[in-house]
């Protein structure tokens, strides 16, 4: 087990009706809040009014900034930074899914920084201070509600890049599974793929032994698999949504990579799909991950056998590990297909024409690698994308 | 799933050699530290000197208070409180196992309190403020290094009682598995029982459904079971110790009872054993828990079947759930026996003569109950203790 530091200070407030607590929690941090959200679905659902009422009752002054798009844009982050400086905002409250939260985190690190916030996403600089962020989560998927990560897209050049900083762990996150009842089915399926991908990135590692984290990841994967069809079949199945929402947080709050280093090649490759084609992150991951698995399989066959047996209950071929390993990957593909996800690039409208461009962008034109389980250069990334066709 | 709040702010610093970081971490909180420890084994092992050197290098002034006994005593807590007030201590650093940490937490809540610190253990008052606590852990067992709990024994009347307060989550905890290499085998076995008991208390609950937490608990139990013989067979098996130590923390940091209320009857009953007979907590739990399980089995047979199948791999009797459930309990007893623990009271030197007295103390002479899975009065507690004979 590798040495590690684990410190996740996010306060989780979980359950029915918990958005009513947002005012009191926010007011304890600041009385001047930037309320950051997306397309306005929170206005249709009534959530916006409930959040505003709670904030006002707690004496909080609210400045609004809506319009966050999926794959949140750098331009809106910059707009938020300007508002925070001008209005002396003390807390950024994201109400929505991963996009609103990631955008809020970008604003949070950018506001006190003299340079360009994009520096933090290219690795040119590291955040030294940040405004506090808090969230009311509406979509179980990105795990950003209790993570230190943010992913933002720069429109010029279609670059989608991550920034990780302990300063961006939300101060509190309110998770009411009821808020997810109205999500469209394709968005639910994308979220499930996103959650599972966070678990898989942490599962395929070289650190040995990592028994506890292996088993905790398997436990979370099995839970997600157990409830996935239930939330899709019955949109208001609270108990199933509660399992899924809490699994989404646990999958990405960094507990499940203690003592090991996750892979993250599939995420880096997917960022190029989203950056160029603006596909949903989860939808992209469902096409990249199986291809990545087939490509790296032989690097550690035993790990793929363990995945097949423990997560999918595959009846192990003791004398033919590769058969068992491949069956595990096939089960993952079958499961994702069963919830309506495409597991090949053409299924999300992507052909072979820009594969080389994506492989080049992903590896800084071949000068760097992605992934830790196996380090992948430009040629390997292109090969994986071809396997995904 | 029940509504819940989860907020564990303890920073975990895990791995080989990490005690060298204690000075810098402590100095960031206070330059005046009470160093609290037990019998002096940390002096023999050299840990004391390494911790002192790190603290001194960081410019920290140290006041020492050793002498913490297993089942830590109220009298020493009071002595610590006096020292903290007189010396204006800013941080209490416990170096040791659960006893040193629990004692430190008692001092932490008692120092700023005008009344008697025992009020917090009897429930007469709740802590409103506390000095910060930090730890260097030497024994994987109690989980106090990342919990909000403290258990202290009042010598007059032999009362062992818990105090839970969010103010007592340690600010940081340093976990170096190497520090456990020199533990005597019986203490290792007691620690394993303690860790497993923390998981079992959280497993037998009435909340439904609690799929994710069920599976996370099973994952942690299986890890502990996997590594237990390894640490006993080879005292310096770092990898096995690392799994056990991290499991001990995860078992008790409150992640594993999110969305549910643990039982805790076995802990309450065991506190009477420890209070009167001064047996080790883990040793007592190994005798109480199987008896408790047999007593409450029929309250939720399906849960005991799940425990047998998922944790112990029992080949399920689909047409005879009770047989499967009982086999699960038998496997637990066999496992504890295999690591040298007694699973009946006479094995730890306790007979039938004071059972009624313990049942009475445990339930305030029959006026209250213990446990949540099934609420148990004086007669039920006595019946469980008789089953443990």
Image (cartoon, coloured by chain):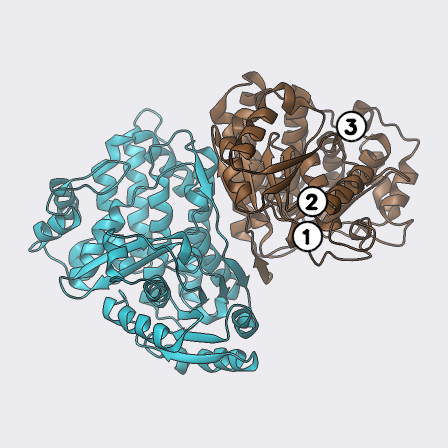
Chain colours: A brown, B cyan
Please provide percent x and percent y for residue B49. Answer: 47, 82
Q: Mark 1 highlights which residue? A: A130
Under circle 1, the secondary element is loop
Q: Mark 2 highlights which residue? A: A105
Q: Is residue B233 above or below residue A70?
A: below
Of all chains, the one bearing label 2 is: A
Label 1: how many Cα within 10 Å (few below 14, some 14–19, many 20+)? many
Label 2: how many Cα within 10 Å (few below 14, some 14–19, many 20+)? many
- Identity of the residue drawn at 10% across and 47% down: B365
Of all chains, the one bearing label 3 is: A
Q: Mark 3 highlights which residue? A: A344
Q: Earlier in the sequence, mark 1 or mark 2?
A: 2
Confirm or deny contact between disc 2 and disc 3 (CB under 8 A). no
Measure how far apart labels 3 and 1 are at the Cα level: 39 Å
Q: Is residue A183 left or right of residue B234?
A: right
Label 3: how many Cα within 10 Å (few below 14, some 14–19, many 20+)? many
Q: Is residue A323 visible?
A: no
- Identity of the residue drawn at 37% across and 55% down: B128
Please provide percent x and percent y for residue B17. Answer: 55, 72
Q: Is residue A48 left or right of residue A360?
A: left
Checking the image for residue B209, the label placed there is none
Under circle 3, the secondary element is loop
- Quadrant in which the N terminus of chain A appears: bottom right
């Amino acid at each position: 087990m590798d040495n590690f530091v684990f410190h996740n200070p996010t306060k989780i407030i979980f359950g029915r009706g918990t958005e009513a607590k947002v005012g009191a929690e926010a007011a304890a941090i600041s009385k001047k809040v930037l309320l950051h959200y997306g397309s306005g679905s929170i206005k249709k659902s009534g959530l916006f009014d409930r959040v505003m009422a709670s904030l006002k009752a707690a004496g909080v002054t609210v400045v609004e900034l809506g319009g966050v798009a999926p794959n949140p844009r750098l331009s809106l982050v910059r707009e938020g930074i300007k508002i925070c400086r001008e209005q002396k905002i003390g807390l950024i409250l994201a109400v929505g899914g991963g996009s609103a939260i990631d955008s809020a985190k970008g604003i949070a690190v950018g506001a006190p920084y003299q340079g360009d916030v994009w520096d933090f996403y290219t690795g040119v600089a590291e955040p030294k201070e940040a405004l506090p962020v808090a969230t009311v989560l509406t979509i179980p998927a990105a795990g950003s509600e209790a993570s230190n990560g943010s992913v933002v897209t720069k429109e010029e050049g279609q670059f989608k890049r991550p920034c990780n900083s302990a300063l961006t762990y939300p101060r509190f996150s309110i998770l009411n599974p009821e808020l997810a009842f109205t999500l469209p089915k394709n968005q639910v399926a994308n979220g499930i793929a996103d959650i599972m991908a966070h678990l898989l990135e942490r599962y395929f590692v070289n650190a040995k032994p990592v028994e506890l984290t292996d088993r905790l990841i398997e436990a979370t994967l099995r839970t997600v698999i157990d409830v996935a069809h239930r939330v899709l079949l019955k949109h208001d199945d609270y108990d199933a949504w509660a399992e899924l929402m809490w699994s989404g947080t646990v999958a990405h709050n960094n507990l499940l990579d203690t003592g090991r280093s996750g892979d993250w090649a599939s995420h880096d490759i997917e960022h190029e799909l989203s950056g160029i084609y603006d596909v949903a992150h989860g939808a992209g991951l469902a096409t990249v991950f199986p291809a990545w698995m087939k490509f790296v399989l032989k690097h550690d066959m035993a790990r793929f056998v363990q995945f097949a047996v423990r997560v999918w209950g595959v009846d192990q071929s003791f004398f033919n590990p590769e058969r068992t390993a491949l069956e595990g990957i096939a089960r993952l593909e079958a499961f994702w297909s069963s919830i309506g996800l495409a597991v090949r690039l053409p299924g999300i409208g992507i052909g072979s024409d820009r594969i080389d461009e994506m492989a080049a962008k992903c590896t800084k034109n071949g000068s760097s690698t992605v992934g830790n389980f196996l380090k992948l250069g430009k040629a390997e990334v292109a090969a994986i994308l071809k396997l995904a066709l």
